[in-house]
Amino acid sequence: MQGDRAKAYRPIPEDRRREALEDGIAAFERGDFFQAHELLEPAWMGTADLAERALYQGLIKLAAGYVHAVRGNPIGMTRNLEGARKHLTTSIERDPSWGASAGIDLDRLLLEVNVRLASARSAVERLATDPGVMLELAEAAPRIR
């Protein structure tokens, strides 16, 4: 388990983690990014499997990035997308079956995260003349499935 979050570990059964994942993805897909983050946290804290934890944490970071997009914070969005990329990559490297078993094409999702990350980085420059740019990014959230 990750040393920095070992204290957050509160085991829950796999079926409840899967339910939290499904509910979190549904919230993300309807644009309720804060709720997605909240729904995914019990799954992340509920498993000791590092690949599974990384999958949930990557999705949590992705949702948090879009919370920042809605709030007009490109720096927060960028940092969270970078974190999402790191955790999703870790999940793939440790055990790619977790993403696949959830119906998530992690390689495709990572490509989409990279595209949005590039847009978020350029948004900082564009904000000076176009404050609506962050809402455009929020509207273009990647589909998880």
Image (tube, rainbow, N blue to C red):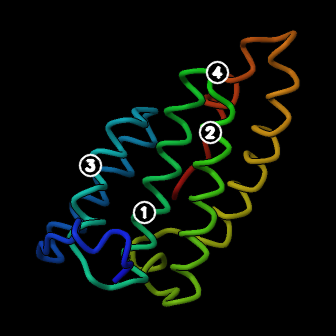
Viewer-nearest of discs 1 and 3: 1
The Cα–Cα distance between marks 4 and 2, rounded to whole angstroms, is 12 Å
**Residue type highlighted by circle 2:** Met
Query: Dividing the picture into quarters, in which one does residue 16 lie?
Result: bottom left
Picture layout, residue 6 above or below residue 43: below
Q: Are marks 1 and 3 in contact (CB under 8 Å)?
A: no
N-terminal-most mark, 3 or 4: 3
Q: Tell me the crowding category of disc 3: few under 14, some 14 to 19, or many 20 or more residues within 10 angstroms, Cα based.
A: many
Picture layout, residue 35 above or below residue 59: above
The residue tagged 3 is: 39
Front one among 66 and 97: 66
Q: Tell me the crowding category of disc 2: few under 14, some 14 to 19, or many 20 or more residues within 10 angstroms, Cα based.
A: many
Residue 141, position as x, y percentages in the image? 61, 40
Label 2 secondary element? helix
N-terminal-most mark, 1 or 3: 3
Residue 116, position as x, y percentages in the image? 73, 45
Q: Residue 77 has which mark?
A: 2
What residue lies at 58% left-to-right and 48% top-to-bottom?
A: 80
Q: Are marks 3 and 4 in contact (CB under 8 Å)?
A: no
Residue 103, position as x, y percentages in the image? 45, 70
The Cα–Cα distance between marks 4 and 1, rounded to whole angstroms, is 24 Å
The residue tagged 4 is: 135
The Cα–Cα distance between marks 1 and 2, rounded to whole angstroms, is 15 Å
N-terminal-most mark, 3 or 2: 3
**Residue type highlighted by circle 4:** Leu
Label 1 secondary element? helix
**Residue type highlighted by circle 3:** Leu
Q: Is residue 19 left or right of residue 107?
A: left
The residue tagged 1 is: 57
**Residue type highlighted by circle 1:** Gln
